Image (tube, rainbow, N blue to C red):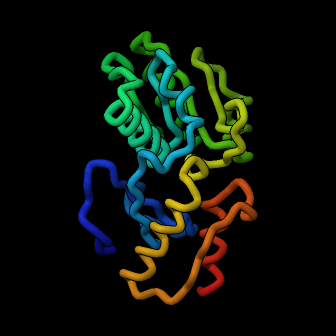
Amino acid sequence: MTLLSDSTKNMFYLQDFRKENHEHQNKTNGLGIWLQSGENTTPHMKGMARMEEDKIFEGWRDKKIYECYKNSISNSKGKLKKETSYGLLHAMGVKDIERIACTCENFNRKYVIISDSDRVAIEKKRDFKGSGKWICYSDIENVEAVTSEDFLTIKFINDSIKKVLTKENIKTQIILNNNNGNNKLSFITSELEKDC
């Protein structure tokens, strides 16, 4: 797949998460949505930014959304100091988190796991025996999020979808609103699958 726009420091790729076989974990095959985070994230990430231990995210996109949020706050408002002694790590999905946690434990590092709130993540959290704390997005006070994409504002996602659909000359219209529920990514995927 060709890139839809030039990549920049705060850009990341989201795929439509259709179940397809890939030769390599990092390859994607689906509609790409380039999103630039920052002021487009909800304020609920502030608590995560204050944790004083390594952070293990379920996937690269989750980590990137957090990094974009953290960079936008520390650069634009000067409220967060740089966390140079704490690592930002990502697993290759919730089933890989235990491997990353073991590595932290082997190096005697304190860590917290931050994952989605879907059924699989909640089951893995329940079975986890490591020394670190595991937080699902639903554990964050006053947050109703299933995936990290739920932290992005609806306006920002709609603007990004519109840009991609226009640039790629795709006639489908996908518009999120407050009635789409907590899982924005599931809604986008279901809308894309209607045209397949």
Is the residue 162 above or below the residue 186 in the image?
Answer: below
The one of 83 and 62 positioned closer to us in this rendering: 83
- Looking at the picture, tell me which residue is in the foreground, 78 or 8: 78
* Quadrant hosting residue 13: bottom left
Q: Residue 136 lies in what quarter of the image?
A: top right
Q: Quadrant of the C terminus?
A: bottom right
Where residue 55 sits: x, y (%)?
47, 27
In the rendered image, residue 170, in percent from the top left (x then y), is placed at 46, 86
Q: Is residue 40 above or below residue 96?
A: below
The residue at 56%/26% (across/down) is: 47
Place of residue 128 in the rendered image (x, y in percent of width and height, measured from the top left)? 66, 26
Q: Is residue 195 left or right of residue 37?
A: right
Q: Identify the residue shown where x is 27% and y is 49%.
A: 9
Using the image, determine if residue 60 lies above or below residue 113: below
Whether residue 45 sits left or right of residue 117 in the image: it is left
Can residue 24 be seen here? The reply is no
Task: Assign the N terminus to one quadrant of the image.
Answer: bottom left
- Taking the spot 69% from the left edge, 42% from the top edge, the residue there is 117
- Residue 151: x %, y % from top left: 57, 47
